[in-house]
Amino acid sequence: MTIDRTVSGTQPSDMPGESSPLPRGEASLAVEWAQNEHAIREAQRLRWVVFAEEQGARILTPEPGFDIDPLDAFCRHIVVRDLRTGQVVACSRILYEEDADRAGGFYSESEFDLSAIRKAPGRTMEMGRTCVHPDYRKTVTIGLLWSGIAQFTAFREYARIIGCASIPMRPDAGASALAAYEYLMARCPSPEDQLPAGRIAASEPRVPPLLMAYVRYGAVVCGPPCWDPGFDTADLLMMLPAENVGPRYLRRYVERRKPEAGGRDG
């Protein structure tokens, strides 16, 4: 899930002016924008630790030890920080459609055919590079990331959120990934690339917790998975229609900000 290009120096439009910790969730955790280069590098370092060191991904990056790709410069980066240590323990990034157009496309377009989504009414935003430190993999951490999207982005101005959700191919050569896909299969255009032929689904689907969290929030699977050989994962194109936003996390934050509808959140 990497792109072999150098990092652009272009910055996203309409970046917010200051970070805003969220006064919800566990007292020691806060979600905020990564407002400067140092905070973004903290997120890129965490991504390296999770994707490369823990999961064994072969990441093409201009700086080993940091997961850096060309889209980073066009994205808004959201982090969850442990206030006791100052450590970034979770992160994600948001790419608005207008910034994706300037960047040459969404990340998902490197794996999937988004022509049907591109033609659909309303604008699209992409969520990607989401990861959580192993010591913080609990629902409240993922929920804080999602609340940050509702708190800080122009979510209400967009018809949908899209993104790639990964299922490891190991240790059964994709059998569990295929079973998870069949378990989660939903209606939407299918991408062109699929898992290598000859895979047989495992008897029991094992869906990663992060992917199940997306489904709980109202996301659907848009079609067959794409095999990412660099990460050795089966990537599913997920879509969260605005009208499907579940009440458990996002709706309460979106509704809370409705009086501010005169301005742009992001």
Image (tube, rainbow, N blue to C red):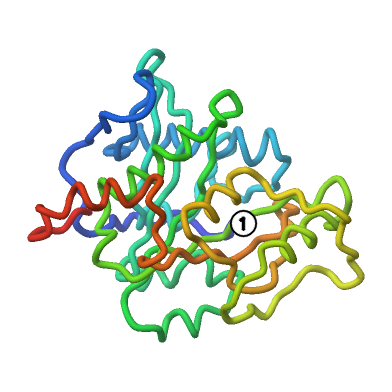
Q: How many marks?
A: 1
Question: Which residue sits at x=71%, y=39%?
Answer: 55
Query: In the displayed structure, would residue 245 be above or below residue 105?
Result: above
Residue 202: x percent and y percent?
87, 56
Left or right, 185 with respect to 27, comes to right
Question: Which residue sits at x=51%, y=49%?
Answer: 129
For badge 1, the amino acid type reads: Met
Residue 143: x percent and y percent?
43, 40
Quadrant of the snapshot with the C terminus: bottom left
Indicate the secondary structure of the residue bearing disc 1.
loop
Residue matched to label 1 = 1
Quadrant of the snapshot with the N terminus: bottom right
Furthest residue in direction top, as rendered: 84
Between 13 and 115, the residue placed more toward the observer is 115
Question: Which residue sits at x=86%, y=45%?
Answer: 171
Between 64 and 49, the residue placed more toward the observer is 49
Rate crowding at label 1 as few (under 14), some (14 to 19) or many (20 or more) other CA atoms within 10 Å.
many
The answer to which image quadrant residue 234 occupies is: bottom right
Residue 192: x percent and y percent?
67, 80
Furthest residue in direction front, as rendered: 247
The answer to which image quadrant residue 53 occupies is: top right
Query: In the displayed structure, would residue 107 be above or below residue 223?
Result: above
